[in-house]
């Protein structure tokens, strides 16, 4: 089968399209064999190719952390997934190939009317948004949610999921184009932090609601953006540390947390796959209901064939991706 292999730690130039042996037709306990239709490309894939991600298989390995496709076989004790199901799944690695093995708890059932390749954009971004906002940040209906990086894949997902959960969403991003997408995804307010003062605008919006700041902050950007958002967080607010796409890991001043009783919550969605898989399983079941009801749908910024995977990585490396980048894995 065709697979995109990472052969070294030099980044994009160490990506090679190769023919390798497919996985066993008889999956193990709790495992599912998938004929892959599409795969989502994430910033973490870029970090993994550069040798800078917190988890990385031994070289060489097949790239790709999430996929979509049709179930070909299931192993013993698989729960809730059946042969013939259309699914999207988090794979950890191995998604950029024509066949892949995934865990049953990592599978999200895809409605029949949903484009299967586009469904590859769902598991990580929307799983991250849903678990982060519900399980970690305890978001409630009616609260004021600030999402930074709201034009990227996970930011747009957080906007949509937050709105579906009944929050009033402030989308913050670096361009009008990105904010248009966030507004279409359900944002009530928009802030262009390339031209506006993030802290002051959030406080202004909050004051109109009788609040002192945002109740919850979902931040995949880090650095100065996180620092401004923290200063715009209200009493007993919750700040979710999702990532550092801006390139700088912020240092959090504890005195600010103390004065306003703020919680800063570290959040690594992938960790639940090993430490508490039930969190992923329950979240994906809730997301299936949202998707089936039409409440959430990913914005696909680029859809490329597997042969152009390097170009997909470059879109992320150069921060030109708006929405989600997906690869078409199945041969035409």
Image (spheres, grey):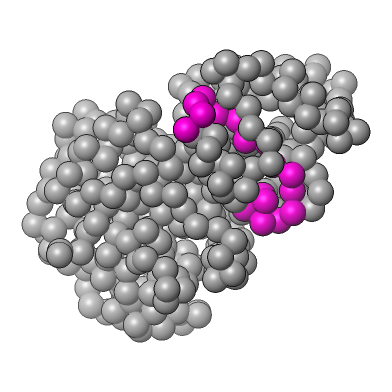
Q: Work out whether residue 14 can be spotted.
A: yes
217 over 57 or under it: above or below: above
Using the image as rendered, state which of residue 111 and residue 242 is in the foreground. Answer: 111
Q: Residue 312 lies in what quarter of the image?
A: top left
Report whether 218 appears left or right of 23: right
Q: Residue at x 46, y 22 (%)?
A: 247
Q: Is residue 37 magenta?
A: no
Q: Residue at x 54, y 18 (%)?
A: 194
Quadrant of the snapshot with the N terminus = bottom left
Residue 327 on image: x %, y %: 27, 52
Q: Residue at x 64, y 43 (%)?
A: 187
Residue 295 on image: x %, y %: 59, 61
Read off the magenta span: 161-177
Using the image as rendered, state which of residue 148 and residue 277 is in the foreground. Answer: 148
Quadrant of the snapshot with the C terminus = bottom left
Residue 201 on image: x %, y %: 72, 22
For this orientation, the residue located farthest to the left is 19
């Amino acid at each position: 089968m065709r697979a995109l292999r990472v052969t070294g730690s030099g980044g994009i130039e160490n990506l090679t399209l190769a023919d390798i042996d497919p996985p066993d037709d008889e999956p193990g306990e709790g495992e599912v064999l998938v004929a892959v239709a599409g795969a989502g490309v994430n910033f973490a894939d870029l970090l993994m190719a550069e040798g800078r991600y917190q988890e990385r298989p031994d070289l060489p390995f097949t790239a790709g952390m999430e996929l979509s496709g049709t179930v070909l076989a299931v192993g013993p004790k698989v729960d809730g997934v059946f042969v013939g199901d259309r699914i999207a799944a988090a794979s950890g690695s191995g998604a950029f190939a024509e066949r892949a093995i995934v865990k049953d708890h990592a599978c999200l059932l895809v409605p029949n009317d949903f484009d299967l390749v586009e469904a590859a954009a769902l598991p990580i971004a929307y799983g991250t948004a849903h678990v982060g906002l519900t399980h970690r940040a305890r978001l409630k209906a009616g609260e004021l949610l600030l999402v930074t990086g709201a034009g990227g894949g996970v930011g747009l997902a957080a906007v949509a999921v937050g709105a579906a959960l009944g929050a009033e969403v402030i989308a913050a991003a670096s361009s009008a184009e990105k904010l248009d997408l966030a507004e279409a995804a359900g944002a009530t307010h928009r802030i262009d932090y390339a031209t506006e003062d993030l802290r002051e605008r959030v406080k202004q919006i909050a004051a109109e609601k009788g609040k002192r700041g945002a109740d919850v902050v979902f931040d995949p950007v880090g650095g100065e953006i996180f620092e401004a958002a923290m200063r715009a967080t209200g009493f007993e607010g919750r700040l979710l540390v999702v990532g550092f796409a801006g390139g700088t890991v912020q240092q959090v001043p504890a005195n600010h947390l103390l004065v306003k009783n703020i919680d800063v919550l570290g959040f690594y969605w992938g960790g639940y796959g090993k430490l508490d898989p039930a969190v992923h399983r329950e979240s994906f079941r809730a997301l299936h209901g949202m998707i089936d009801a039409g409440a959430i749908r990913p914005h696909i910024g680029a859809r490329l064939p597997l042969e152009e995977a390097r170009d997909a990585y470059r879109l992320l490396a150069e921060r030109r991706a708006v929405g989600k980048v997906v690869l078409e894995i199945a041969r035409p």
